[in-house]
C-alpha cells in the first residue's frame, strides 16, 4: 500500500503481480489500471478517471459549451483522462442515430505538453498562442497532473491573457493557484473526501519536540524556517521545540482519509477471510495458512464494504476503486467554492443545500454565439462538414429529406412527401374521407343546398294538386321522378369535393353519371308522350299505361348507363393522386379522357330527345306544346352545358382544384336546368292560375266547346289564353288515350 501516482504504480504492480501480491494505491486514478488482465492485483481507494471524465463532460453539457480545445500532458493521468473523454464523445455521438449533429462537445484542437522537456513546452506554447489568435475557441479542458497544469497555465497567462478571457475546466483544484489570476470563473472537478478531524487536530497541534517522525519534523522545520536537533536543514535559526505546522497541508489531509480507508479495507478483508477459513477459532487456524494466497485476498477485498473511519460514509468498492463521488468547484473571487457537492454520475442528482450558484464568465455570450456560428442548427437541412468542428447548412430540394447520416438529400417517391422535420417521407394519407372545401367549392355547396330548398316545395305543390287538370296534363309521374332526381343531382354535386378515397371518387362519379342519364331519360319519355310517337303509343297500349311504358324506358336507359359505368370502373379504376406542391388530392377520373365515356349515354339521349321535342311542338294542345318548347330549349342548354364543361376539363395546364370545381358544376347546373325546364313552368301555372285549374271551370269550358264541335278533356287553349286564329279540331288526353 502506498500514496504513489500512476506512473510509479505501473512499475510496482508489474513487480508484485509476479508474486500474486495485491497492490493498493491511494493516489492513482488512471482508468487503464482498471484492466485486470494487465493489472490483475491492483486496487485503489482513489476514484477511476472514467467517471471524472464523465463529470467534466457533464459540466460542459450543462453550460452548453460545445466547441472546445483540449490541453493535456504526457503523464499516465493526462493520457487516461483524455482517452476516456474522447470515448465519451464518440459514444454519445454514435448513440444518436436519428440526428448525428446532436450537440456533443467537439474538440477543435488538442495540445499535448511534455512538461519534462522545456523546449517541447515552449514549442507547444507557440502553437497554442497561434491558435488563440486564429480561432475563436475560448473554452479549454485541461487533462494534466497538478504540477504540469500549473506550469501550462502560468505560461498562458504570460502571453497576456487575464481573468475572464478564457474559460477553463480542470480535473482537480490546483494546490497552489495564488498566482493564476487567469483561472477566475474556471471549473474544477475533484474527489469528494471527508477529512479526518482527529487526524487534523493531531497534526496541527503536535510540536516538533513531541514527534519522532522524520518527514513530519522536516515539514515543521520547513514551515517555520528553523532547524531542530541533529536534523540537517538549510536554516540558520534553531527551533525551540514548540513549533507546530502553521499552514495546513491540505493534500496530506485529503490523502489521510484514503490511507486510513486502505488500512481498514485490508483489516476488514483479513477478517472476512478469517471467518471463512477459521469460523470462530481465534488466531490463525491451519486452514487459513493452507488456503490464504494473493488471489483469495484480492477476491475478498473486492467484496468487502465497511464504514469509513470516523465517518458515516460507507466505503463500497466499484470495480476495485472508490465510489465516484466528486465536488464541482468554481473559482470565484480567488477562492474555490462548491457549486455542486457530492456529484455521483452513477446516481440520481440531488443538489445539496449548501451549493453556491455559479457565476457566468463575462465572455459567456461570445462563447455561445461562437458555438452557434460554428455549429449551425441545420434544421431541415444537411450539414456540410468542414475541417475541425464547424459546418455549414444546405437546404434539400422541395421533396427531399435529410437522410439518417445527415450527409445527403434523399428524394421522396411520387406518392410521398417529407414530414414536418424533413427526416422521413410520409404518405398523403389522412383520416378524413373528404378534405375541407375551398371558398369556391363552398359557394357551389351553398347553391346545391339552395337548389334542394327550391325543389322540395315544388314537389309539395305538385303532390298536393296532383288531381288537378294542369298537373295531370304535365305527366305527373315523370314530374315526381324528376323531382327526386334533381335533389340527388344537387347532393352528388356536393359530394364531388376532394376526397382521399378512390372508392368515394368512383362512387360519386358513377352516381353522377347515373343521375344525368336518369334526368335526360325522363325528358325523353316526356317528349315521346307529348309528341304521340307511334311506337311509344303502341308500346304503352301493350303495357296498359303510358306510365309503365315511361318507367320501362327510364329503367332501360339507367341500366345501360350502369353497365357502362361498371365497365369503366373495371377497366379504369380511379385512384387518388396528390399534388405535392398544393397537397391537393386529385381523382384520376377527373383528368382522364376515358371518363368522357360516362357522358356519351346522356348525350345520345339528349340528341334523340331533340327530335321528339321538336315534333311535339306540333301537338294540338297548346299547354303541352309550351312544355315541348321549354323542354327543347332545356335540351339545347344541356348540350351547350356539357360542351363547355368538357372543354374546361380538357384544357391543358389546368389545376386539379379547377377541374374539381368544374366537375362539381356539371350535376349542379344540370339540376338547375331540369328544375327550370320541368318543374318551374307547371308549378308557376298551378300557383298563379288556380281558378283556371279548377275541374268545374274546365267542365264549363268543355260544354262551350261542344257547341263548336270540339271534343276535349283538358282545355289547354283556355288555360293558356289560346292565340287568335288557332283552331283545334280534336284533342287527346295527357295520357295519350285517343277519344273521338
Image (tube, rainbow, N blue to C red):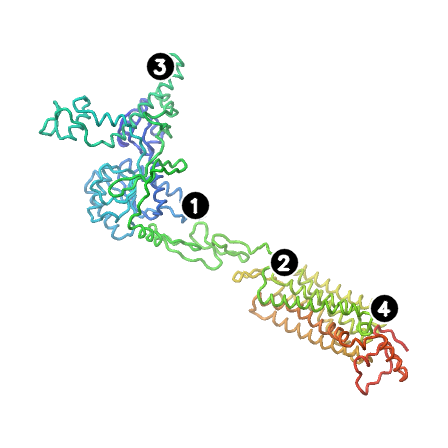
Circles 3 and 2 in contact, beta carbons < 8 Å: no
Q: Disc 2 to disc 1, how far (Cα)?
A: 40 Å
The C terminus is located in which quarter?
bottom right
- Mark 1 nearby-residue class (10 Å; few <14, some 14–19, many ≥20): few
What is the residue that sits farthest to the bottom in this orientation? 725
Label 1 belongs to which residue? 96
The N terminus is located in which quarter?
top left
Q: Disc 4 to disc 2, how far (Cα)?
A: 43 Å
Q: Disc 4 to disc 3, how far (Cα)?
A: 126 Å
Secondary structure beneath disc 4? loop
- Mark 4 nearby-residue class (10 Å; few <14, some 14–19, many ≥20): some
Nearer to the camera, 584 or 264: 264
Label 2 belongs to which residue? 502
Q: Which mark is residue 545?
A: 4
Q: Earlier in the sequence, mark 4 or mark 3?
A: 3
Q: Which mark is residue 608?
A: none
Residue at image position (73%, 62%) is 563
Secondary structure beneath disc 2? helix
Nearer to the camera, 110 or 236: 236
Label 3 belongs to which residue? 289
Q: In the image, residue 586 lies at what x, y percent?
A: 59, 62
118 left or right of 69 in image: left
- Mark toward the viewer: 4 or 1: 4
Q: Is residue 692 above or below residue 580?
A: below
Q: Is residue 323 above or below residue 441?
A: above
- Mark toward the viewer: 4 or 2: 4
Q: Disc 3 to disc 1, how far (Cα)?
A: 55 Å
- Mark toward the viewer: 4 or 3: 4
Amino acid at each position: 500500500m502506498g500514496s504513489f501516482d500512476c506512473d510509479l504504480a505501473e512499475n510496482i504492480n508489474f513487480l508484485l503481480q509476479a508474486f500474486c501480491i495485491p497492490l493498493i494505491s491511494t493516489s492513482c486514478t488512471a482508468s487503464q489500471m482498471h484492466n485486470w488482465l494487465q493489472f490483475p492485483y491492483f486496487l485503489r481507494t482513489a476514484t477511476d478517471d472514467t467517471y471524472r471524465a464523465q463529470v467534466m463532460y457533464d459540466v460542459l453539457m450543462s453550460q452548453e459549451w460545445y466547441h472546445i480545445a483540449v490541453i493535456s500532458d504526457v503523464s499516465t493521468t493526462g493520457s487516461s483522462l483524455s482517452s476516456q473523454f474522447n470515448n465519451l464523445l464518440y459514444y454519445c455521438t454514435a448513440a444518436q442515430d436519428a440526428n448525428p449533429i446532436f450537440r456533443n462537445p467537439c474538440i477543435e484542437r488538442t495540445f499535448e505538453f511534455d512538461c519534462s522537456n522545456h523546449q517541447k513546452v515552449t514549442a507547444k506554447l507557440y502553437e497554442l498562442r497561434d491558435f488563440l489568435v486564429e480561432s475563436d475557441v475560448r473554452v479549454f479542458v485541461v487533462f494534466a497532473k497538478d504540477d504540469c497544469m500549473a506550469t501550462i497555465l502560468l505560461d498562458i497567462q504570460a502571453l497576456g491573457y487575464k481573468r475572464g478571457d478564457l474559460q477553463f475546466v480542470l480535473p482537480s483544484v490546483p494546490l497552489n493557484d495564488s498566482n493564476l489570476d487567469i483561472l477566475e470563473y474556471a471549473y474544477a472537478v475533484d474527489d469528494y473526501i471527508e477529512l479526518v478531524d482527529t487526524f487534523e487536530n493531531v497534526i496541527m497541534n503536535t510540536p516538533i519536540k513531541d514527534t519522532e517522525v522524520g518527514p513530519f519534523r522536516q515539514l515543521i522545520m520547513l514551515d517555520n524556517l528553523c532547524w531542530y536537533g541533529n536534523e540537517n536543514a538549510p536554516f540558520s535559526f534553531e527551533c525551540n521545540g514548540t513549533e507546530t505546522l502553521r499552514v495546513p497541508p491540505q493534500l496530506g489531509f485529503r490523502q489521510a482519509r484514503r490511507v486510513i480507508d486502505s488500512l481498514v479495507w485490508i483489516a476488514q478483508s483479513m477478517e472476512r477471510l478469517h471467518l471463512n477459513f477459521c469460523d470462530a477459532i481465534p488466531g490463525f487456524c491451519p486452514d487459513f495458512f493452507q488456503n490464504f494466497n494473493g488471489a483469495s485476498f484480492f477476491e475478498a477485498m473486492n467484496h468487502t464494504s465497511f464504514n469509513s473511519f470516523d465517518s458515516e460514509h460507507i466505503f463500497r468498492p466499484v470495480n476495485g476503486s472508490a465510489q465516484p463521488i466528486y465536488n464541482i468547484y468554481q473559482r470565484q473571487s480567488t477562492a474555490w467554492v462548491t457549486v455542486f457537492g457530492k456529484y455521483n454520475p452513477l446516481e440520481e442528482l440531488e443538489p445539496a443545500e449548501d451549493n453556491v450558484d455559479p457565476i457566468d464568465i463575462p465572455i459567456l455570450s461570445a462563447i455561445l454565439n461562437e458555438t452557434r456560428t460554428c455549429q449551425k442548427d441545420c434544421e431541415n437541412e444537411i450539414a456540410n462538414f468542414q475541417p475541425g468542428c464547424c459546418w455549414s447548412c444546405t437546404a434539400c430540394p422541395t421533396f427531399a429529406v435529410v437522410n439518417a447520416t445527415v450527409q445527403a438529400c434523399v428524394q421522396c417517391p411520387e406518392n410521398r412527401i417529407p414530414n414536418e422535420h424533413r427526416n422521413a417521407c410520409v404518405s398523403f394519407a389522412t383520416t378524413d374521407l373528404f378534405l375541407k372545401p375551398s371558398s369556391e367549392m363552398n359557394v357551389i355547396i351553398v347553391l346545391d343546398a339552395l337548389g334542394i330548398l327550391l325543389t322540395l316545395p315544388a314537389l309539395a305543390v305538385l303532390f298536393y294538386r296532383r288531381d288537378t287538370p294542369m298537373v295531370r296534363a304535365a305527366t305527373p309521374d315523370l314530374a315526381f321522378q324528376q323531382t327526386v332526381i334533381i335533389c340527388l343531382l344537387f347532393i352528388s354535386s356536393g359530394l364531388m369535393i376532394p376526397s382521399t378515397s378512390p372508392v368515394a371518387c368512383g362512387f360519386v362519379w358513377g352516381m353522377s353519371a347515373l343521375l344525368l342519364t336518369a334526368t335526360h331519360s325522363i325528358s325523353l319519355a316526356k317528349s315521346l308522350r307529348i309528341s304521340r310517337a307511334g311506337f311509344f303509343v303502341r308500346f304503352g297500349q301493350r303495357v296498359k299505361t303510358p306510365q309503365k311504358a315511361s318507367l320501362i324506358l327510364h329503367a332501360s336507359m339507367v341500366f345501360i348507363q350502369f353497365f357502362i359505368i361498371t365497365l369503366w370502373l373495371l377497366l379504369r379504376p380511379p385512384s387518388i393522386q396528390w399534388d405535392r406542391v398544393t397537397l391537393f388530392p386529385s381523382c384520376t377520373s377527373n383528368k382522364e379522357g376515358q371518363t368522357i365515356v360516362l357522358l356519351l349515354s346522356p348525350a345520345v339521349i339528349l340528341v334523340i330527345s331533340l327530335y321528339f321535342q321538336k315534333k311535339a311542338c306540333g301537338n294540338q294542345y297548346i299547354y303541352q306544346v309550351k312544355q315541348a318548347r321549354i323542354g327543347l330549349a332545356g335540351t339545347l342548354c344541356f348540350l351547350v352545358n356539357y360542351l363547355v364543361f368538357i372543354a374546361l376539363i380538357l384544357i391543358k395546364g389546368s389545376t386539379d382544384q379547377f377541374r374539381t370545381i368544374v366537375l362539381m358544376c356539371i350535376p349542379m347546373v344540370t339540376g338547375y336546368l331540369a328544375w327550370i325546364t320541368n318543374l318551374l313552368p307547371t308549378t308557376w301555372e298551378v300557383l298563379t292560375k288556380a281558378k283556371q285549374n279548377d275541374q268545374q271551370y274546365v267542365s264549363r269550358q268543355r260544354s262551350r266547346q261542344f257547341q263548336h264541335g270540339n271534343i276535349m278533356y283538358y282545355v289547354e287553349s283556355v288555360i293558356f289564353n289560346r292565340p287568335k286564329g288557332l283552331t283545334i279540331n280534336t284533342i287527346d288526353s295527357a295520357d295519350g288515350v285517343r277519344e273521338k
